Image (cartoon, rainbow, N blue to C red):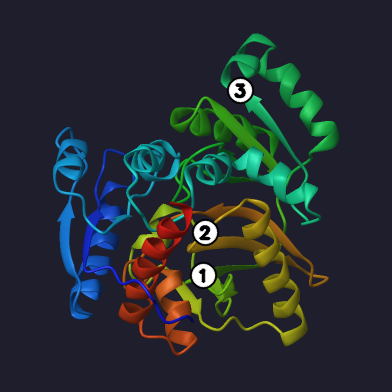
Amino acid sequence: MSSPSLTASRVVVLAGGISHERDISLKSGRQVADALTAHGIAVELRDPDASLLPSLMADPPDVVWPALHGASGEDGALRGLLEFLGLPYVGSPAHATRLAWDKPTAKSLVERAGVPTPHSITLTRDAFRELGAESVLAVMGQELPPPLAVKPAQGGSAQGVSLVSSDEELRRAMVLAYTYCDVALVEQRIIGTEICIGIIDTGDGPVALPAVEIEPKSGVYGFEARYNAGETTFYAPARVDAATVDRATAVALDAHRALGLRHLSRIDLMIDGAGTPWFLEASVMPGLTETSTLALALEAAGHDVGWVYAELAHAALRDAARTV
């Protein structure tokens, strides 16, 4: 990773917000703030509210780190405002964030780039209701028989996600997904090994971290399995043969580039029985708690988490200087 020619000495870390993932964001933000502080960077940790933008305008920091999960940090709106203010920030640019945040759009873009992703259909709540649930489900069943995964088109931490093995389960899954978003993504479920690959770019181009294998005790890597201790076993590096890891790494990097992501991302993949890695989704601001997969991957790679976070802050400042 590159040595910074410009260094950030003061960083505002944003954590909390009003999304369903507020608590996770607060934990991520605290981890980032502590890591940056340990590396000599002055940090202000704050919850975004109505006073945020006036404060940033009155006393601009070197860098903003939006450690926000869910819509408040990952739909591109906040990042667009930071760009209007000319403030450097850690993470993907606003336009790329908007693309990655919408799962059907992200799938279309990576598929166009040659990345395999499960066959799927996207359905609005209005279409599901107006065309008749029974008729819609009957048509879907011809092309997308169970097993399926149903998820809100936007959102994170697997909230509103269901794994479906029957038509009756599919009906319930659609209703659940629509409680989180007006658009649902229904995709063929790939049976195999779930992994994620974190990607870091501090200025020398995107670098893939060791793959992390995810083994939830319940068999479903849902919200509880992600954040309740003991519910999931993580293997870093993944217990997958080297050739398969190489293929998965190439897919993750291709997806990262196809979506135009920057600084850091997490690419979620499923590896089927033939060893083919399938793109599921991308996170533009992955969880950064001490038990998050990105932290596990950094440790497996032998990196000091605090040093990497400091490098990312410096990279954000350098990137902004290049665009001036």
Residue 132: horizontal and vertical position, in percent?
68, 13
Please tell me which of labels 2 and 3 falls first in the chain.
3
Please tell me which of labels 3 and 1 falls first in the chain.
3
Instruction: Indicate left or right for 183 with 57 as reference.
Output: right
Can residue 148 be spotted in the picture?
no
Mark 1 vs 2: CB contact within 8 A? yes
Whether residue 97 is situated above or below residue 252 in the rendered picture: above
Whether residue 13 is situated above or below residue 276 in the rendered picture: above
**Badge 3: few (under 14), some or many (20 or more) residues near its Cα, within 10 Å?**
some
Specify the amino acid type for callout 2. Answer: Arg
In the image shown, does 100 or 225 lie closer to the viewer?
100
Residue at 47% from the left image edge and 80% from the top image edge: 2
Specify the amino acid type for callout 1. Answer: Asp
Which residue is the site of mark 3? 124
> Which residue is situated farthest in the top direction here?
130
- Tag 3's secondary structure? strand
Please tell me which of labels 1 and 2 falls first in the chain.
1
Specify the amino acid type for callout 3. Answer: Thr
Whether residue 95 is situated above or below residue 14 in the rendered picture: above
Which residue is the site of mark 1? 201
Foreground label between 2 and 3: 2
Work out how far the residue at label 1 is from the one at label 2, CA to CA, in angstroms: 7 Å
| Quadrant housing residue 292 | bottom left
Residue at 71% from the left image edge and 45% from the top image edge: 109
Which residue is the site of mark 2? 262
